[in-house]
Image (spheres, rainbow, N blue to C red):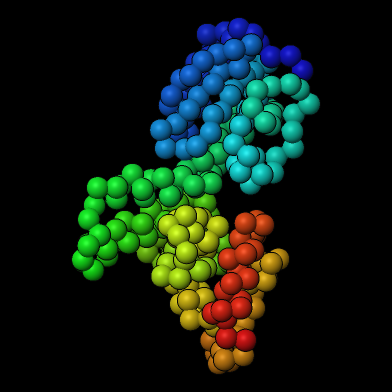
């Protein structure tokens, strides 16, 4: 399928608006009908094109982690980056661009880089100073988990921010590095009850995202937790080593 090259005024304006409204405000270049955009906060470059002012519209990506997480069917056409996708409408393109940005600020090490930049000049001599650094890291981790998990508990569908917790799979204090502490795959965004149960080792998950309950759970708690679940976790391979640690070291079988 051919694209408009060079882009007309209308297509160029629509591409710039779509990119800007979804977090990619850096206009980079246009080549062979593809307009490239970047972000100061999200990793990766996006490329936008169209067959004409009425569409279809095309998105090319160069961020391997984002491409894998999206899991979209590829468009049968050449393009820049590592993958190209087609959309019949601007609305469909906008919906995917929003997710591209959420993943771009979460993967693979964007939270770690943000943390390192914010604490680079902070002292860590006293316990109070180290606590400040830890608090900054945990705040970043929560914000990126909110992005990654669509701002809702993936088990229960609860989306009230006050009832959501950023749950480390391997606890902060037991991580071997800041890279582990800030890795969104080492985290789950759980409702408060599920977070408490997970942190206490009373629940965990297998590699397919199915709930595993501890034999220590009393009947009422078991019923309350099980009754709130609307679906299993959807996990990536990157989650599995962390969950293996939780099952082996924290979960009370």
Return the residue nearer the eye: 151 or 115.
115
Relative to residue 139, is residue 53 drawn left or right? right
Q: Residue at x 43, y 26 (%)?
A: 25
**Relative side of 236 to 164, left or right:** right
Q: Which of 214/112 is in front? A: 112
Residue 87 seen anywhere in this rendered image of the structure: no
**What residue appears at the point 60 percent right and 68 percent down from the top-left corner?**
243
The percent position of residue 171, horizontal first and vertical second, equals 46, 70
Above/below status of 208 relative to 88: below
Number of dots carrying numbers: 0
> Which quarter of the figure has residue 182?
bottom left
Image x and y of residue 56, in percent = 68, 22
Q: Quadrant of the N terminus?
A: top right
Q: Inspect this view and state whether residue 169 appears.
A: yes
- Residue at (36%, 50%) from the top-left corner? 115
Q: Quadrant of residue 228?
A: bottom right
Query: How far across and down, in percent of the image, does residue 107 sit?
Result: 53, 46
* 38 displayed left or right of 66: left
In the rendered view, would you say 98 is above or below 135?
A: above
Q: How far across and how far down the image is residue 195, in percent?
A: 47, 73
Q: Quadrant of the C terminus?
A: bottom right
* Residue occupying image coordinates x 47% and y 33%: 22
Above-or-below relation of 66 to 53: below
């Amino acid at each position: 399928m051919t694209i408009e090259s060079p882009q007309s005024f209308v297509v160029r304006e629509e591409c710039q608006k779509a990119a800007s409204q979804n977090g990619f405000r850096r206009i980079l270049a246009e080549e062979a009908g593809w307009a490239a955009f970047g972000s100061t906060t999200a990793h990766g470059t996006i490329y936008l094109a169209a067959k004409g002012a009425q569409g279809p519209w095309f998105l090319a990506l160069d961020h391997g982690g984002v491409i894998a997480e999206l899991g979209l069917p590829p468009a049968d056409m050449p393009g820049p980056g590592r993958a190209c996708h087609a959309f019949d409408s601007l609305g469909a393109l906008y919906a995917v661009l929003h997710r591209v940005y959420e993943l771009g600020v979460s993967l693979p090490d964007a939270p770690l880089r943000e943390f390192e930049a914010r604490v680079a000049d902070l002292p860590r001599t006293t316990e109070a100073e180290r606590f400040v650094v830890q608090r900054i890291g945990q705040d970043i981790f929560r914000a990126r988990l909110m992005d990654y998990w669509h701002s809702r508990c993936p088990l229960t569908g609860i989306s009230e921010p006050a009832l959501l917790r950023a749950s480390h799979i391997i606890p902060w204090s037991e991580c071997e590095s800041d890279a582990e502490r800030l890795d969104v795959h080492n985290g789950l965004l759980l409702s408060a009850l599920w977070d408490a149960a997970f942190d206490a080792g009373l629940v965990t998950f297998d590699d397919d995202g199915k709930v595993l309950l501890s034999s220590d759970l009393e009947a009422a708690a078991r019923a309350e937790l099980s009754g709130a679940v609307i679906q299993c976790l959807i996990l990536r391979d990157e989650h599995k080593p962390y969950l293996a640690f939780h099952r082996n070291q924290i979960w009370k079988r």
